[in-house]
Image (tube, rainbow, N blue to C red):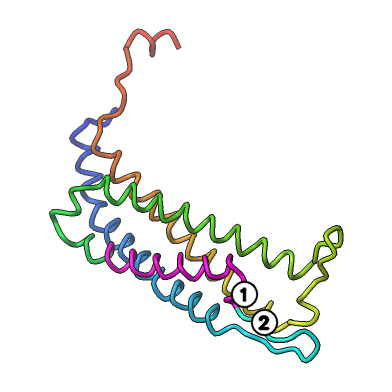
Amino acid sequence: MSRTRVDETSSIQNHLPMLKLFDSSLRLCAVPLSLATVWITVTNNQDNTSYGTLRYSNFSGLKYMVYVSALCTCYAIVAAACSWVKYVVTKAWIFFISDQIVAYIIITSIAATMEIYYLAYNGAKEDSWSQACSSYGKFCRKVKLALILHMITFGCFFFLAVISAFRAFSVFDPPSVNSQDVLED
């Protein structure tokens, strides 16, 4: 028994409200995660009597993560609001492209922050850089926490990118299969 195109269309239409709710929930879930990342990173500083004060503003990668997290917060709020506006919802390509861009930007900031964390934790003995986490343990723990929250935010946007891709491409018919090709297989 084969399913007809009408059955597939009605099945997709029945799942759209649930998908829309999940989409909005993920967007709204990304907001506090991004805000927490910004707050933890911006308030992160530690003073050491031997080496001085270390702040997030000393590292361009951490500043970049703060900017990206702020952008994610703003985008998630606007996109969640727009996902309930009928005119914008019909423009699935807008969400598809913007969700992809935000997910890729988050990945770049994760990479930059992971590099900083790796160098602070392990050092680079070939370049005469000693590890900093032994002297600035609290600072490193906060960077690690902010990085974990940022990765969870990326997880939200990864699933949002998949959902928006489904919504953008589900309006197209599947490729037609020639009946002779099916019989030959």
Q: Is 108 part of what is drawn in magenta?
A: no
The answer to the question of whether label 1 and label 2 lie on touching residues, with beta carbons closer than 8 A, is yes
In the figure, is residue 127 to the left or right of 167? right
Element type at mark 1: helix
Main SS category, magenta section: helix
Residue 81 at x, y percent in the picture: 23, 66
In the figure, is residue 108 to the left or right of 3? right
Q: Nearer the viewer, residue 150 or 46?
A: 46
Q: Is 61 part of what is drawn in magenta?
A: yes
Judging by the rendered image, the residue that carries numbered circle 2 is 54
Q: State which quarter of the image contains the N terminus.
A: top left
Judging by the rendered image, the residue that carries numbered circle 1 is 58
Q: CA distance from mark 1 to mark 2?
A: 7 Å
- Depicted 58 relative to depicted 152: above or below: below
Asked where in the image residue 132 lies, by quadrant, the reply is bottom right
Asked where in the image residue 28 lies, by quadrant, the reply is bottom left
Say which residue appears at 59% left-offset and 83% top-offset: 44
- Report the magenta residues as a range: 56-79
Under mark 1, the amino acid is Asn
Asked where in the image residue 127 lies, by quadrant, the reply is bottom right
In the figure, is residue 25 to the left or right of 66? left
Q: State which quarter of the image contains the C terminus.
A: top left
Under mark 2, the amino acid is Leu
